[in-house]
């Protein structure tokens, strides 16, 4: 089997065929093509509704093989997708008819417990990394989902359970090994290829394939947290956000205003009603954590209270590998969520008949907000609250109505900040990508893109085009 391509280079036409047979003989990693028994499973990603069929999926085993595949894609003109955990909302983890460079076999991890650092290959998931470092009572903050690949979440920023205490994932990134578009493996840090290291911290997969990260580790052993479910009245929603903003930095929260699914731990009378399902993590002393959580428990009679001392990896909720939701969403930043804003949230959620609709609110600040805006490619350091509006749809015919609802909802909630978080963007066009990198950040990223990827080989991402 072969991939046949035609592309224009330097004003002429170059033709090259990529042979699956030759790929298999050249690489130690697995090379999976249509018709192979594991092809369907290997092209499945987290989100449903994404049905791309790559010509080949290469599950590389090391950085040398990454370089080989990147060079092959550049020389042949075949579209290249890079996959870590496969959680791209826009489907960027796959290519239609091209090459998927799958990092999932690259799971090496070296932990220096005494020095509180770790070198981690980018095929690891957040859950795998967290469980391993927890053996030493240490952690690096990622997101809130165990199956997310550390490659993608790190490059986009990384907002999760430790954001207010220890900053974004990129704030704890000390170095990275990256294969750039010319196939070279570069070591980057604050002193080596510093411009590229700056861009990698928030600029997504635009600049190369990260093969290894060096992270800072923090002492995080027992935390106080878990799930607290409250009735979602405007007063409770506004009260929760006010309490989260006033809480110590050790506490990071995720508040989901949503219709209650028939979960066994919820009263049957609550099923189908609006609830505030919150995930909370206090990364500090247990007694202080219990005091910090008390104001939230006092907002209303909890429908479920599962807050307790636990090992940090227990914060990751169990996942069903067969779950592949189809959803549309919008990511945005808010300055405040008062009762008036909460009334708007409740009204839109009640008026929708989507099978599931959610407004997610994350209070930011703390350690994340103390990093200067210009220090990394993540430029939203002063944002106070991140909101995510999500509507699930049941089929292609249902999708346009859900998209219209999300658009109207976002317009009603807007408070003048048009920013976006790159990791939560779908396939929304260059204007929304630009919103993720406002002001001088955008032009600086375009200059660095021109330096390291002038032909935009790495374009299946929230794409930043090279400067002219």
Image (cartoon, helix red, strand yellow):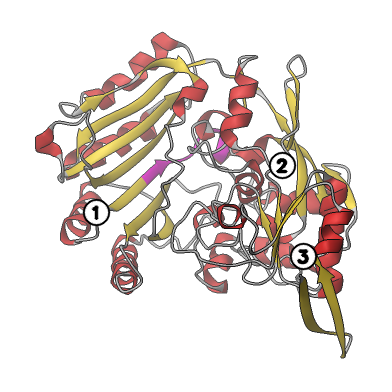
What residue lies at 46% left-to-right and 23% top-to-bottom? 314
User: Which residue sits furthest top?
Assistant: 287
- In this rendering, is residue 339 above or below 448? above
> Nearer the N terminus, badge 3 or badge 1?
1
Quadrant holding the C terminus: bottom right
Looking at the rendered image, the disc whose residue lies closer to the viewer, 2 or 3, is: 2
Q: Which mark is residue 105?
A: 2
Q: Secondary structure at mark 1?
A: helix
Q: Are marks 1 and 2 in contact (CB under 8 Å)?
A: no
Determine if residue 127 is in view.
yes
Residue 257 x %, y %: 27, 45
Horizontal side of 214 relative to 162 (left or right) equals right
Q: Quadrant of residue 244?
A: top left
Looking at the rendered image, the disc whose residue lies closer to the viewer, 1 or 2, is: 2
Q: Secondary structure at mark 3?
A: helix
Q: Which mark is residue 68?
A: none
Horizontal side of 160 relative to 330 (left or right) equals right
Q: Which mark is residue 449?
A: 3
Q: Which mark is residue 345?
A: 1
Any magenta on residue 209?
Answer: no
What residue lies at 82% left-to-right and 56% top-to-bottom? 24
Q: Quadrant of residue 315?
A: top left
Horizontal side of 414 relative to 61 (left or right) equals left
Residue 56 x %, y %: 70, 63
What residue lies at 55% left-to-right and 15% top-to-bottom? 221
Q: Secondary structure at mark 2?
A: loop
Find the distance from the CA under tag 2 to the CA under tag 3. Answer: 28 Å
For the record, the magenta segment spans 361-368
Q: Residues within 10 Å of mark 2 (few under 14, many from 20)?
A: some
**Depth check: 11 or 56 in front?**
56
Find the distance from the CA under tag 3 to the CA under tag 1. Answer: 39 Å
């Amino acid at each position: 089997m072969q991939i046949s391509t035609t592309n224009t280079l330097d004003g002429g036409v170059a033709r090259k065929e990529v042979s699956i047979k030759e790929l298999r003989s050249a690489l130690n990693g697995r090379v999976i093509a249509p018709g192979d028994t594991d092809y369907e499973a290997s092209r499945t990603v987290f989100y449903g509704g994404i049905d791309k069929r790559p010509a080949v999926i290469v599950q590389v085993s090391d950085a040398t093989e990454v370089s080989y595949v990147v060079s092959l894609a550049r020389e042949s003109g075949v579209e290249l997708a890079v996959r870590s955990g496969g959680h791209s909302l826009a489907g960027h983890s796959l290519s239609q008819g091209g090459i998927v460079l799958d990092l999932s076999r690259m799971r090496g991890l070296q932990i220096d417990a005494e020095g509180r650092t770790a070198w981690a290959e980018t095929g690891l998931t957040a859950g795998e990394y967290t469980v391993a470092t927890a053996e030493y009572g240490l952690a690096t903050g990622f997101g809130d989902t165990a199956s997310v690949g550390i490659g993608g979440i790190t490059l986009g920023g990384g907002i999760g359970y430790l954001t207010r205490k220890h900053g974004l994932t990129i704030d704890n990134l000390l170095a990275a090994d990256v294969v750039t578009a010319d196939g070279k493996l570069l070591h980057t840090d604050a002193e080596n290829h510093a411009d590229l290291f700056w861009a990698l911290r928030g600029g997504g997969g635009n600049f190369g394939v990260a093969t290894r990260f060096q992270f800072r580790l923090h002492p995080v052993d027992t935390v106080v947290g878990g799930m607290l479910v409250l009735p979602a009245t405007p007063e409770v929603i506004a009260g929760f956000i006010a309490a989260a903003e006033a809480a110590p930095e050790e506490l990071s929260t995720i508040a989901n205003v949503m219709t209650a699914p028939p979960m066994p731990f919820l009263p049957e009378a609550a099923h189908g009603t609006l609830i505030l399902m919150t995930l909370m993590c206090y990364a500090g002393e247990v007694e202080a954590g219990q005091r910090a959580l008390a104001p939230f428990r006092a907002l209303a009679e909890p429908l479920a209270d599962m807050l307790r001392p636990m090992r940090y990896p227990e914060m990751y909720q169990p996942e069903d590998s067969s779950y592949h939701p189809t959803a549309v969403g919008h990511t945005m930043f808010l300055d405040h969520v008062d009762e008036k804003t909460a009334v708007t949230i409740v009204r839109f959620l009640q008026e929708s008949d989507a099978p599931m609709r959610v407004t997610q609110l994350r209070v930011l600040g703390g350690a994340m907000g103390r990093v200067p805006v210009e220090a990394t490619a993540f430029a939203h350091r002063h944002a106070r609250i991140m909101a995510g509006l999500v509507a699930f749809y049941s089929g292609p015919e249902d999708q346009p109505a859900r998209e219209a609802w999300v658009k109207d909802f976002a317009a009603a909630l807007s408070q003048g900040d048009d920013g976006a978080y790159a990791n939560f963007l779908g396939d929304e066009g260059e204007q929304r990508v630009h919103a993720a990198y406002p002001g001088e950040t955008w032009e600086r990223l375009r200059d660095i893109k021109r330096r390291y990827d002038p032909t935009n080989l790495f374009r299946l991402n929230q794409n930043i085009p090279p400067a002219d």
